[in-house]
Amino acid sequence: MKKARIPTVGDLKALAERVLQLRDDAPFFSLEVYEALQPLRAALGRALPAIFDGCSEEARAEIDRQWRLERSMRARKYTGTGAVDTPDETWEQMRAASLAGESLRILAERFGVIHSAVVNRSVRDRFRGLPWKEPPVPSNVISFPRSPVSP
């Protein structure tokens, strides 16, 4: 099977120019518009994965973060309330309040963040070495000492 050629920036510009040359009053749901957009869509479908694969690890991480942020904002009615789209400054304030003794439920209500996002972030931060208030130990559970992890 023949592998499709990755388009250059010049190719993409030429295809975009075809779209830009459409009449402003061209009917959107028409063969004319479809024929102008389809080659651009196909070329972008080949170019974007190739660009991602060729990026540095830092650029990939930023692209991934941006993609998750945009995806979470579309999926939620109120943006800025989840684990991805809440600013880092807010997380730091919440972590400090947690260490001062506030429960995660109260923090979620006070800062307007989804409770599960607060719980997940606190677990991830503890895993990375950032302290949060330890969750209370249930009174109806017998706690056993943890066994050491063997290599």
Image: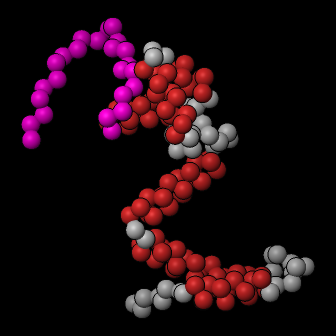
Name the outermost residue toward the right: 25
Q: Quadrant of the N terminus?
A: bottom left
**Magenta stretch, main secondary structure class:** loop
| Quadrant (top left, top right, bottom left, bottom right) of the C terminus | top left
* Left or right: 106, with 37 as reference point: left
- On the image, the x and y values in percent for residue 42 come to 59, 81
Colouring convention used in this rendered image of the protein: secondary structure
Q: Is residue 14 above or below residue 101?
A: below
Residue 15 position within the rendered picture, expressed as x and y whole percent measured from the top left: 67, 87
Q: Nearer the viewer, residue 27 or 88?
A: 88
Residue 82 visible in the current orientation: no
Q: Residue at x 88, y 79 (%)?
A: 24
Point out the stretch of residues depicted in magenta. Answer: 128-151
Quadrant of res 141: top left
In-image side of 126 versus 60 (left or right): left
- State whether residue 148 is above or below residue 142: below
Is 90 in front, or is 143? 90
Q: Is residue 14 left or right of residue 98?
A: right
Asked if the stretch drawn in magenta spans residue 132, the answer is yes
Which residue of the protein is positioned furthest toward the bottom in this rendering? 2
Residue drawn where x is 9% and y is 37% of the image: 150
Q: Quadrant of residue 45?
A: bottom right
Across and down, in percent, residue 122 comes to 42, 31
